Image (spheres, helix red, strand yellow):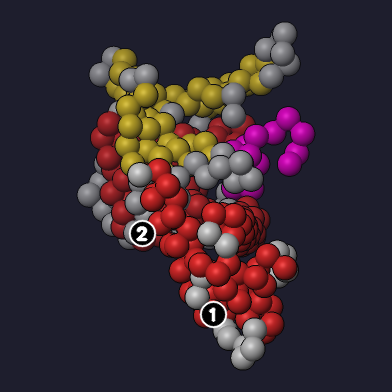
């Protein structure tokens, strides 16, 4: 990861620049996302003005390019530099009839009707309002809005692409979030973050395989521990019978297994079975050992009674 740059910033950097082949309806859907989030609408002297106030060059450049490509507007731009941090701040203005034209188009009933427009809308919302965690740590994508209706609209648009999301309220903001790695990957595909989509999928597959391997190893370890515990228990049961009653207390087949278990304490069930004459299977040995355990437990109960 690039030093001092968050994972969110890296994804947004990939999306920087303007989509030259995008259709006008998609341009307007993208601008609609700006009017829903970062663009202020101010009324003075019965006129409305649009103002984008940001320190994010990607947002400023995108809004400028969208307005120019969709309507031929040349926005007024003011750039200020903080004397202490040397960080630039961008103010973009659209006033009068031009502002009205953009707002009228963005309020059209045709907004978000086509799949490509929905994708353009999600992309602009991602650039304006989203953050995504480093998938190496956890899967979490969220969009933060000040208005509930914007959050609800995004949920509907994501649902169109069969992407389930959830909504919570955090400090008076409405947060639409996704914690499913596959769905986050799908969002990356929709907004055109192809490089990070591939990296994300590779990491997701690696984590899935690693988790499956760990699950199997843990399962096998648990089974081995269970088997070892059973072997120790069988050994104790045989020794208890020998001490309290002697091997003569056991019937022939059980006595044979008990003697071999004491003589070869580290032998497996299969190995004990092969030492018998005639040989028997693992399940046969296990069956006899369990019978011996039942006898030992019965003797212990009688002793306590």
Residue 261, position as x, y percentages in the image: 65, 68
Residue 278 sits in quarter: bottom right
Q: Is residue 88 left or right of residue 62?
A: right
Q: Which residues are magenta?
A: 1-15
Position of residue 196 measured from the top left corner of the image (x, y, whole percent): 62, 53
Query: Residue 240 or 147: which is nearer the viewer?
Result: 240
**CB atoms at circles 1 and 2 under 8 Å apart?**
no
Quadrant into which the C terminus falls: top left
Work out whether residue 165 or residue 299 is closer to the camera in this orientation and state it.
299
Place of residue 282 in the rendered image (x, y in percent of width and height, measured from the top left)? 57, 79
Residue at 73% x, 41% y: name it.
Answer: 1
- x, y (%) of residue 11? 61, 45
Tell me how far mark 1 sits from mark 2, CA to CA.
67 Å
Does any portion of residue 44 appear in the rendered image? Answer: yes
* Residue sitting at the far left: 109
Q: Which mark, residue 253?
A: 1
Report the residue marked by disc 2: 161
At a point 29% along the width and 43% down the height, the residue shown is 153
First in residue order: circle 1 vs circle 2: 2
Residue depicted at 44% across the width and 24% down the height: 51
- Left or right: residue 169 versus residue 26 is left
Residue at 32 percent across and 37 percent down: it is 167
Q: Is residue 75 magenta?
A: no
Residue farthest to the top?
A: 84
Res 49 visible? no
Q: Secondary structure at mark 2?
A: loop
């Amino acid at each position: 990861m690039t030093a001092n740059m968050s994972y969110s910033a890296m994804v947004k950097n990939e999306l920087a620049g303007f989509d030259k082949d995008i259709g006008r309806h998609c341009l307007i859907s993208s601008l609609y996302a700006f009017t829903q989030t970062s663009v202020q609408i101010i009324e003075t002297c019965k006129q409305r003005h649009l103002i984008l106030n940001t320190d994010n060059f990607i947002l400023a450049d995108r809004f400028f390019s969208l307005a120019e490509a969709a309507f031929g507007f040349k926005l007024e731009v003011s750039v200020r530099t903080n004397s202490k941090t040397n960080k630039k701040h961008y103010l973009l203005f659209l006033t009068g009839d031009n502002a009205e034209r953009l707002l009228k188009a963005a309020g059209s009933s045709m907004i978000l009707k086509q799949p490509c427009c929905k994708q353009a809308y999600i992309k602009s919302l991602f650039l304006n309002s989203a953050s995504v965690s480093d998938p190496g740590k956890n899967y979490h994508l969220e969009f933060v809005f000040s208005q509930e209706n914007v959050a609800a609209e995004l949920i509907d648009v994501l649902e169109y692409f069969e992407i389930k999301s959830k909504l919570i309220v955090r400090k008076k903001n409405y947060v639409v979030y996704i914690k499913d790695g596959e769905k986050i990957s799908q969002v990356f595909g929709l907004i055109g973050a192809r490089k990070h989509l591939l990296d994300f999928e590779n990491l997701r597959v690696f984590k899935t395989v690693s988790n499956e391997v760990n699950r199997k190893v843990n399962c096998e370890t648990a089974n081995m521990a269970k088997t070892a515990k059973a072997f120790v228990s069988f050994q104790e049961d045989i020794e208890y019978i020998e001490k309290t009653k002697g091997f003569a207390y056991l019937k022939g087949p059980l006595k044979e297994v008990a003697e071999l278990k004491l003589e070869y304490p580290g032998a497996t069930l299969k190995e004990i079975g092969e030492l018998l004459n005639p040989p028997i299977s693992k399940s046969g040995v296990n069956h006899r050992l369990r019978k011996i355990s039942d006898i030992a437990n019965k003797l212990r109960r009688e002793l306590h009674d």
